[in-house]
Amino acid sequence: MTTDVPGLNPRREAREEALALLYQAELTSSPVDEALGAREVPPAAYAVEIALGVDDERDDLDALIGRHLTNWRVDRMPMIDRVLARMAVWEFRSKPDIPTGVVLSEAVELASIYCGERSAPFLNGVLDSVAGEVRG
């Protein structure tokens, strides 16, 4: 059961939970299932959906992101930037009901909180380019 609380965004919180799960899996080179199993409190259903979706499609997501990088490679991106990019691209592809602007702004906002100062503009540019390919 979810309760709407004024000022809180359940999808934003789920994205943050998914970011934590995917970051942990990336950091430990383990599947997301292990990160999920280690949680004492189960994450939101949308967080699990994102994390498992990104984990299942990682190679395809990386290939798509890589096509939109100039003089850079996905494996050289900072880990959190890479995870955020994968999450956003997964949402572009898997959640057509979520507006492109929402996916972009959420990724950029999370980057401005959790990443370096150059990450938000970098991700905005890359993800905007990917969105053009994926969503037209």
Image (tube, rainbow, N blue to C red):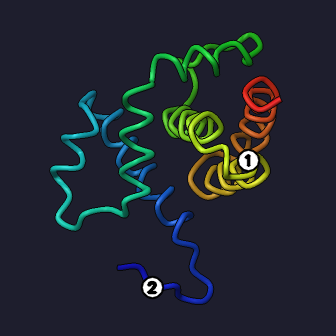
Q: Residue at x 35, y 33 (%)?
A: 26
- Residue type highlighted by circle 2: Thr
Instruction: Classify mark 2: helix, strand or loop.
Output: loop
State whether residue 95 is above or below residue 29: below
Which residue corresponds to mark 1?
Answer: 104
Q: Residue at x 37, y 28 (%)?
A: 56
How many other residues sit within 10 Å of disc 2, few (<14), some (14-19) or many (≥20)?
few
Residue 122 in the image, given as x and y percentages of width and height: 75, 35
Residue 29 in the image, given as x and y percentages of width and height: 27, 27
Q: Is residue 24 left or right of residue 57?
A: left
Q: Nearer the viewer, mark 2 or mark 1?
A: 2
Q: Quadrant of the C terminus?
A: top right
Marks 2 and 1 sit apart, C-alpha to C-alpha, by 25 Å
Residue 123 in the image, given as x and y percentages of width and height: 71, 37
Q: Are marks 2 and 1 in contact (CB under 8 Å)?
A: no
Which residue corresponds to mark 2?
Answer: 3
Upstream in the sequence, badge 2 or badge 1?
A: 2
- Residue type highlighted by circle 1: Leu
